[in-house]
Image: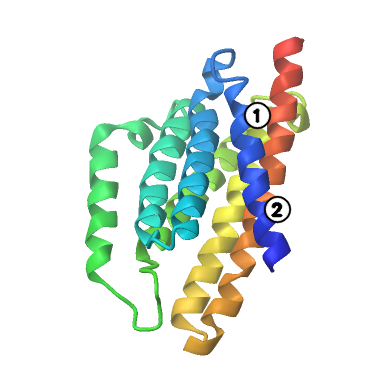
Amino acid sequence: MNNILFFSALSTFLVGIYSILFIRKAQEFKWVLNYCIFNAIIEALTLILAWWQINNIILIYVLVFGELFFLIKYFSNLLENVKWIGSWKSLVILFLLLISTFAIKHPQAYINPNPQIIEGLYITFLCLLFFNKELKHPKYTNILIEPSFWFIVGFLFYYGCSLLILLSTNYFFEAEKFIYVWNIHNLLYLIKNIFLIVGLICLSRLLKS
């Protein structure tokens, strides 16, 4: 699993650096690009704190809040007819819900999984909402060359699978199996980054056309 962890971190940096190249050219995708850059920054801070043997658990919660903010803004642009997604009222309610979950702890978990479970549920729901809209009212003639398709496939795969892992490791598996099952998360993260890279390649071609 150490190799998967290495390639997962490396792919996060590559996606973040690649995203910087488009941040001024592709305003339509600025929120997902900011998401990628934010992930790379958090990954770097996590590795630095781990190198110095400083507890970096707080960065996981910062990551959850940051990811949610950027992705909600991204989906609010994609799903323009669904006004409540990007409203401040919805954001406040969601973040208050996230904060309240810190009061609910699970005895088997070293990290409080509840904020990540809420994040997984919400992002998975938004991804399914996008595909439902696209099936009913297609916006793209060839969806496979659209950056948004690959971005959202990556998000749906990663957050959907992570949600299942978080639920199973905290409510179904025995405590000693927690670390083993959680290591699969690094593989999911790597695969998500591969989808993001494909999306960025499509974005590059779109900007050149």
Picture layout, residue 62 above or below residue 76: below
Chain-order first, disc 1 or disc 2: 2
- Which residue is depicted at the point 77% across and 27% down? 142
Quarter of the figure that contains the C terminus? top right
Which type of secondary structure does the marked residue at label 1 adopt? helix
The amino acid at mark 1 is: Tyr
> Can residue 125 be seen from the camera position used here?
no
Horizontal arrangement in the rendering, residue 97 relative to residue 127 (left or right):
left
Graded by Cα atoms within 10 Å as few (under 14), some (14 to 19) or many (20 or more), the crowding at tag 2 reads some
Quarter of the figure that contains the N terminus? bottom right
Residue 7 numbered mark, or none:
2
Q: For the residues marked 1 and 2, what is the alpha-carbon distance in whole angstroms?
A: 16 Å
Residue 103, x across and y down, in percent: 22, 68
Can you tell which quarter of the image residue 145 is in? top right
Can you tell which quarter of the image residue 106 is in? bottom left
Residue 95, x across and y down, in percent: 27, 48
Graded by Cα atoms within 10 Å as few (under 14), some (14 to 19) or many (20 or more), the crowding at tag 1 reads some
Q: Nearer the viewer, residue 131 or 89?
A: 89
How many labels were placed on the picture?
2
Residue 116, x across and y down, in percent: 42, 59
Callout 1–callout 2 Cβ contact below 8 Å: no
Can you tell which quarter of the image residue 165 is in? bottom right
Horizontal arrangement in the rendering, residue 95 relative to residue 24 (left or right):
left
Identify the residue position indicated by label 1 in the image: 18
- Which residue is depicted at the point 50% across and 57% down? 51
Picture layout, residue 174 above or below residue 200: below
The amino acid at mark 2 is: Phe
